[in-house]
Amino acid sequence: MRKTKLLLDVISNMRSLADSLEAAANMMCDSQPAPNTVSVEVPTVGEPKADTPSYTLEEVRAVLSKKSAEGHGAQIRELLGKYGHNRLSDIDPNDYPALLADAEVL
């Protein structure tokens, strides 16, 4: 059972690495427009509204992959579950800012 879990963790990390490599390749290729770009306004208390950053799937994937490589793979999977999915690509792009904010505290 332990070997199976270890193998599943290796597979998960390899998928994260593949996603990171894909995101890096897409960033290097200027001719491809960034899909899944979403802009979300989040008002703050006591401050005027400011433009909140928009994130692409590739940008979020790169951040989460880095966190996973730092040893936070299990927490990343829990975060994805918190947003109702097991895969980042299934998460609503409107949730990207909140997801990144949650990931930053890891």
Image (spheres, rainbow, N blue to C red):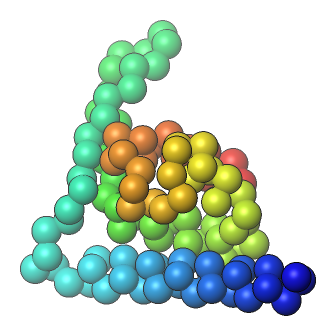
Q: Quadrant of residue 29?
A: bottom left
Could you tell me which residue is drawn at 26 percent across and 46 percent down?
Answer: 38
Q: How many marks?
A: 0
Q: Is residue 60 visible?
A: no
Q: Pick the quarter of the image with the C terminus.
A: bottom right
On screen, residue 20 above or below 36:
below
Q: Residue furthest left?
A: 31
User: Which residue occupies the foreground of this view, 84 or 27?
Assistant: 84
On screen, residue 34 above or below 105:
below
Q: Quadrant of residue 40?
A: top left
Q: Is residue 29 visible?
A: yes
Could you tell me which residue is drawn at 58 percent across and 87 percent down?
Answer: 14
Q: Is residue 49 left or right of residue 20?
A: left
Could you tell me which residue is drawn at 36 percent across and 77 percent down?
Answer: 23
x, y percent for residue 53: 34, 44
x, y percent for residue 48: 36, 16
Q: Is residue 97 left or right of residue 38?
A: right
Q: Is residue 13 left or right of residue 59?
A: right
User: Which residue occupies the foreground of this view, 13 or 6?
Assistant: 6
Q: Pick the quarter of the image with the N terminus.
A: bottom right
x, y percent for residue 30: 16, 79
Q: Residue furthest right?
A: 2
User: Which residue occupies the foreground of this view, 72 or 104?
Assistant: 72
Could you tell me which residue is drawn at 72 percent across and 80 percent down?
Answer: 9
